[in-house]
Amino acid sequence: MIIAPLTVDRISDLEKLLALGEPYIRLRASSDYWLYATLFGNTCPIAIVDGQVVGNVIAFRSQVDPSEIYLQDVMTHPNHRRAGITRALIEEVHRQASLWACQRLFRTSEPDNQAAHRAWLALGFTNVPGDAVEHGVSVIHDYKGPRKHRAVYERRIES
Ligand SMILES: CC(C)(COP(=O)(O)OP(=O)(O)OC[C@H]1O[C@@H](n2cnc3c(N)ncnc32)[C@H](O)[C@@H]1OP(=O)(O)O)[C@@H](O)C(=O)NCCC(=O)NCCS
């Protein structure tokens, strides 16, 4: 497996991968991926196996609080799951975060995404206590706006 920053020439391959991600991943506009590759490549690694893009993370360092990195989209090809691809991609973002002396990775999930819940816990994230528990997952109501309830996960980075 090769882990590399997202580059513009890989965007069409990435879109093919992300098109398989419903219901939890929704394909964005091509120009969004151009932006991620051009401005945020260091925190948007892709995983390549046999020349194919089989996993990715889209993440951004906050400009409001530069000690934080937000993980927006995480996806592994259905044929390559449970093979450590997300683990390797998160470690790459963590490595970059450590170089920048960041203190926290965080992300949100749809409360019913049990595979993601298990993955974040296995990868050393904690499920931030919320105002409700649904299917064993702590959820913060209206976190991303009205009725946009989310489970929030964070992983601290030792300096
Ligand atoms: C969630 C997702 C990104 C995990 O990717 P992955 O590459 O399969 O994850 P990894 O192989 O690195 O898994 C690391 C650990 O997480 C846990 N884990 C991952 N998927 C799991 C599942 N479906 N059930 C239980 N545990 C799981 C395991 O402990 C795993 O380690 P192990 O296989 O050695 O036991 C993948 O299932 C996916 O792409 N889902 C669809 C898109 C999505 O929901 N993205 C997240 C949006 S919030």
Image (cartoon, helix red, strand yellow):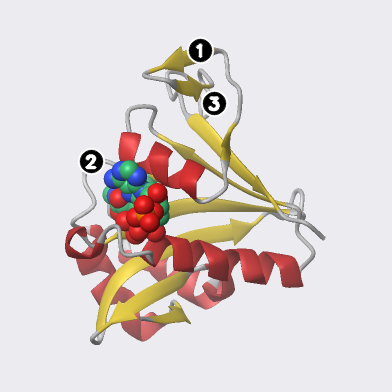
Q: Nearer the viewer, residue 103 or 85?
A: 85
**Exactly how many numbered labels are in the figure?**
3
**What is the distance, in whole Å, between disc 3 and disc 2 at their CAs?**
19 Å
Disc 2 marks a residue whose amino acid type is: Pro
Residue at 26 percent of width and 66 percent of height: 15
Between circles 1 and 3, the one closer to the viewer is: 1
**What is the distance, in whole Å, between disc 1 and disc 2 at their CAs?**
23 Å
Q: Could you tell me which secondary element the residue under label 2 belongs to?
A: loop
Callout 3: few (<14), some (14-19), or many (20+) C-alpha neighbours within 10 Å? some
Point out the tag, 1 or 2, that comes first from the N-terminus: 2
Q: Which residue in the structure is indicated by mark 3?
A: 143
The quarter of the rendered structure image containing the C terminus is: bottom right
Callout 2: few (<14), some (14-19), or many (20+) C-alpha neighbours within 10 Å? few
Q: Nearer the viewer, residue 153 or 6?
A: 153
Give x and y (percent) for residue 115: 32, 41
Q: Which residue in the structure is indicated by mark 2?
A: 23
Disc 1 marks a residue whose amino acid type is: Ala
Relative height, residue 67 to residue 151 (above, below): below
Q: Which residue in the structure is indicated by mark 1?
A: 132
Q: Quadrant of residue 109?
A: top left
Disc 3 marks a residue whose amino acid type is: Tyr
Residue at 25 percent of width and 87 percent of height: 51
Any atom of ligand 1 within 8 Å of the CB at mark 3? no
* Residue farthest toward the top in the current orientation of the protein: 132
Q: Could you tell me which secondary element the residue under label 1 belongs to?
A: strand
Q: Nearer the viewer, residue 52 or 42?
A: 52
Q: Is there any visible trace of residue 28 in the rendered image?
A: no
Relative height, residue 4 to residue 118 (above, below): below
Q: Is there any visible trace of residue 134 in the rendered image?
A: yes
Give x and y (percent) for residue 31: 38, 67
Point out the tag, 1 or 3, that comes first from the N-terminus: 1
